[in-house]
Image: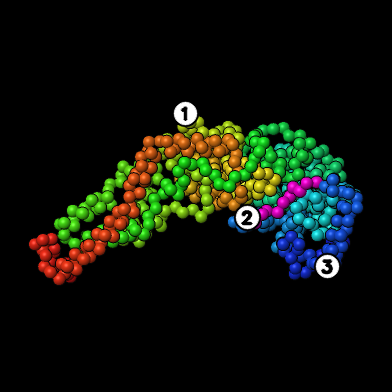
């Protein structure tokens, strides 16, 4: 009751200002616009300028996701159940979950400081107000007391949630909580998985130092906090984390949980001195779009020629059209064993044998530009063996002698896409050296179909609890190149080595020769076909008027 009274008395003035406007950072909010907003802005700015606090302001670490990323899949960056921190805290559709936060705060208070007022905990953070604000990219149009209150409540809720991530054995011996956890009941397990999805989002992060201050007030060993955050990272990381005994001081160097997880994942990747982004990659000697057959409108003329010649029983014309029919009906059994030729042959059969109605429909024209590297299936057909590496992302490599492609272990579940996308968004906000961005481009390039995902699963490279293999392919194919590309040396070297081997194999060389000399001659063939069509139409008109079976052996039902 005391908590609810304090909460209501502290936030009553702010909540009474609710209106139907949008806040200064473009989100729907229950707060309204008033003169108090201008006064708060003036107070914050004047305090910084007069006291020269710019040198002590912490660098921004919690960014808004750029539209170039969020436009493709906004649900991956926008919390759907729980808003933490100032960005989404007061969205009306998320405010229903406030009772969970209040229950968590009440539970902590009853266990750790039952004889003290909740306001005392909030007061310990007053000196940290400016530091809290400095972590966020956007201007926070909130009263200082209101900001400290909801940040404290969110911090307590987050700590209670992180406690569920440590093992049950450690949970029993923990001094943090002795009562049953909020998310241990059957009805709350689903909510727990949904909240986990929201906790990892970039715009939902809370500064770690705030959690440490709460531990100081509660007089709890901070090793409990260390255990919570490291267990959380191990639980949610899709990538293999190298075992490392992190100290509490190392944890405090990271501004929030997402940053800690990111740095743990890429800790062994060597960052070059000059990690300059590039405009366009050039990994493959043969662009993917050139590998696929292009069937133009001239081929339809050839189709018309074949259809017309099938209705004419002319020996002279048969001698001309016979070689063309042989090309169309060429046995492709041998060629289909070559990489990518199977799909090419299918397209030709459908296009040339069925009046060209479906020409080009099955040809792959990806809306999103992919990295230029063959798929898993194509590489396996070319003799490449995929192997599980024992390390993290830094262990990606291609052994040219043994023809082995080493990839790290990747664990996927229903929340993995959200986690990876937000890690990439955070990486794009702080660095030009996009390690995870390049990794997702690599996986997007080699995984095109469900068969590719299935092959990697058999090798133990990808482990997933998704329903179908196709969902894995869709996950990576949805990882669009919506951010600037970046060169990552060890991944780029691997891509170059794989392409050199693949395009240097005999099968692919034969296929490229066929593509160059056979399909390169279609334009000449279509020109010849156009001339022949005109001649045949003239010959058909001539034979319809004059009797010429003696010269050309025309069937009697020609005119019918």
* Residue 237: mark in rendering: none
**Quadrant containing the N terminus in the rendered view:** bottom right
Judged by its main secondary structure, the magenta piece is loop
> Which secondary structure, mark 1?
loop
Q: Does residue 526 appear left or right of residue 559 in this picture?
A: right
Residue at screen point 35% across, 51% down? 346
Q: What residue did someone put label 1 on?
A: 401
- Residue 31: image location, x then y, percent: 79, 64
Q: Earlier in the sequence, mark 1 or mark 3?
A: 3
| Residue 504 in view | yes
Q: Is residue 84 above or below residue 241?
A: below
Q: Which residues are magenta?
A: 58-68
Q: Are marks 1 and 3 in contact (CB under 8 Å)?
A: no
Q: Are marks 1 and 2 in contact (CB under 8 Å)?
A: no
Toward which corner of the image does residue 98 lie, by quadrant?
Answer: bottom right
Per the model, the C-alpha gap separating discs 1 and 3 is 70 Å
- Residue 360: image location, x then y, percent: 39, 56
Residue at screen point 36% across, 42% down? 513
Mark 3 vs mark 2, foreground winner is 2
Residue at screen point 59% across, 45% down? 278
- Residue 340: image location, x then y, percent: 40, 45
Q: Does residue 28 appear left or right of residue 520 in this picture?
A: right
Per the model, the C-alpha gap separating discs 1 and 2 is 41 Å
Q: What residue did someone put label 2 on?
A: 68
**Quadrant containing the C terminus in the rendered view:** bottom left
Q: Earlier in the sequence, mark 3 or mark 2?
A: 3
Q: Does residue 521 appear left or right of residue 451 in this picture?
A: left
Q: What residue did someone put label 3 on?
A: 34
């Amino acid at each position: 009751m005391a908590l609810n009274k304090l909460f209501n008395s502290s936030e009553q003035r702010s909540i009474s200002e609710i209106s139907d406007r949008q806040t200064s950072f473009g989100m729907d909010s229950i707060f309204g616009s008033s003169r108090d907003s201008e006064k708060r802005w003036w107070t914050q700015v004047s305090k910084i300028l007069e006291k020269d606090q710019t040198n002590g302001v912490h660098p921004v670490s919690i960014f808004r996701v750029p539209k170039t990323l969020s436009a493709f899949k906004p649900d991956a960056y926008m919390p759907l159940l729980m808003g933490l921190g100032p960005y989404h805290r007061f969205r009306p559709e998320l405010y229903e979950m406030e009772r969970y936060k209040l229950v968590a705060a009440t539970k902590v208070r009853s266990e750790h400081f039952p004889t003290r007022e909740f306001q005392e905990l909030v007061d310990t953070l007053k000196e940290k107000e400016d530091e809290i604000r400095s972590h966020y990219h956007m201007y926070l149009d909130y009263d200082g007391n209101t900001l400290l209150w909801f940040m404290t409540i969110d911090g307590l809720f987050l700590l209670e949630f992180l406690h569920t991530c440590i093992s049950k054995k450690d949970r029993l011996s923990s001094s943090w909580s002795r009562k049953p956890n909020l998310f241990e009941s059957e009805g709350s397990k689903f909510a727990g998985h949904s909240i986990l999805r929201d906790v990892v989002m970039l715009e939902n992060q809370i500064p770690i130092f705030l959690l440490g201050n709460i531990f100081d007030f509660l007089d709890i060993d901070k090793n409990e906090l260390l255990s919570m955050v490291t267990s959380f990272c191990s639980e949610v990381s899709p990538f293999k984390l190298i075992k490392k005994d992190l100290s509490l001081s190392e944890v405090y160097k990271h501004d929030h949980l997402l940053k800690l997880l990111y740095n743990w994942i890429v800790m062994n990747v060597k960052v070059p001195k000059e990690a300059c982004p590039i405009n366009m990659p050039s990994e493959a000697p043969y662009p993917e779009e050139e590998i696929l057959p292009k069937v133009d409108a001239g081929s339809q003329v050839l189709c018309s020629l074949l259809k017309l010649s099938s209705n004419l029983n002319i020996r002279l014309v048969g001698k001309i059209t016979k070689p063309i029919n042989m090309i169309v009906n060429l046995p492709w059994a041998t060629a289909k064993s070559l990489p990518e030729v199977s799909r090419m042959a299918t397209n030709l059969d459908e296009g040339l044998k069925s009046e060209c109605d479906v020409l080009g429909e099955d040809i792959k024209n990806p809306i999103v530009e992919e990295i230029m590297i063959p798929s898993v299936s194509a590489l396996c057909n070319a003799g490449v063996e995929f192997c599980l590496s024992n390390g993290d992302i830094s262990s990606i490599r291609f052994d040219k002698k043994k023809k082995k492609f080493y990839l790290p272990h990747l664990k996927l579940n229903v929340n993995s896409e959200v986690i990876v996308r937000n890690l990439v968004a955070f990486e794009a906000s702080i660095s030009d050296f996009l390690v995870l961005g390049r990794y997702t481009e690599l996986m997007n390039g080699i995984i095109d179909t469900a068969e590719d995902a299935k092959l990697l699963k058999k090798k133990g490279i990808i482990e997933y609890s998704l329903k179908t293999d196709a969902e894995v392919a869709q996950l990576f194919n949805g990882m669009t190149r919506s951010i600037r590309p970046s060169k990552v040396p060890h991944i780029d070297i691997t891509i170059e080595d794989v392409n050199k081997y693949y395009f240097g194999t005999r099968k692919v060389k034969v296929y490229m020769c066929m593509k160059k000399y056979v399909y390169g001659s279609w334009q000449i063939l279509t020109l010849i076909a156009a001339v022949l069509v005109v001649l045949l139409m003239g010959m058909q008109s001539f034979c319809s008027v004059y009797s010429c079976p003696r010269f050309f052996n025309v069937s009697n039902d020609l005119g019918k």
